[in-house]
Amino acid sequence: MASTFFIDKWFLELFSKFPFLESLKLNNCEVPEKIDISSVRLKMLELWSCSNLKEVNIDSQNLLSFGYNGIGAPEPTISFFNNSSQLEVNSHIEVDYDDL
């Protein structure tokens, strides 16, 4: 599967053009090292095998579901701000058992 590269500025401009976006899935893509996502309406966010990602900052008071699958990608720092008390987080991080 081919990867798509998101330039940080392009991603932020695109994201801001969809103020009523409630669901966002990024799958098997190359993203900037840092992504800041701020949305009042976003309810579901999934990041699956996004390479290059080192930091994710999520400010979304109505976010109910966050999924992260880091297979084939480095483990990023993920921070939540103003999150819902009902937020459900599911993550799958690849672990090299030799490092344990």
Image (cartoon, rainbow, N blue to C red):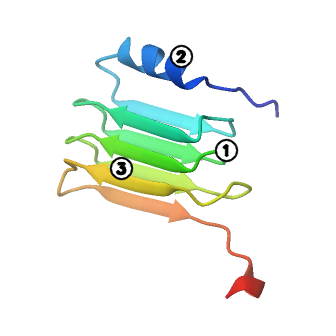
Q: Which residue is mark 3?
A: 65
Q: Which residue type carries mark 3?
A: Ser
Q: Is residue 68 above or below residue 96?
A: above
Q: Which residue type carries mark 1?
A: Asn
Of labels 2 and 1, earlier in sequence is: 2
Q: Quadrant of the C terminus?
A: bottom right
Q: Which residue type carries mark 2?
A: Trp
Q: Give SS at disc 2.
A: helix
Residue 44 point in image, percent of width and height: 37, 41
Residue 14 point in image, percent of width and height: 46, 15
Give the side of residue 47 with respect to residue 78, left or right. right
Q: Is residue 44 above or below residue 96?
A: above
Q: Quadrant of the N terminus?
A: top right
**Is mark 3 in CB contact (under 8 Å) with mark 1?**
no
Of labels 3 and 1, earlier in sequence is: 1
Of labels 2 and 3, earlier in sequence is: 2
Q: Report the Cα–Cα distance between label 2 and label 3.
A: 25 Å
Residue at x 74% of width, y 77% of height: 96
Residue at x 38% of width, y 59% of height: 89
Instruction: Report the disc number at residue 52.
Output: 1
Residue at x 36% of width, y 54% of height: 79
Instruction: Report the disc number at residue 10.
Output: 2
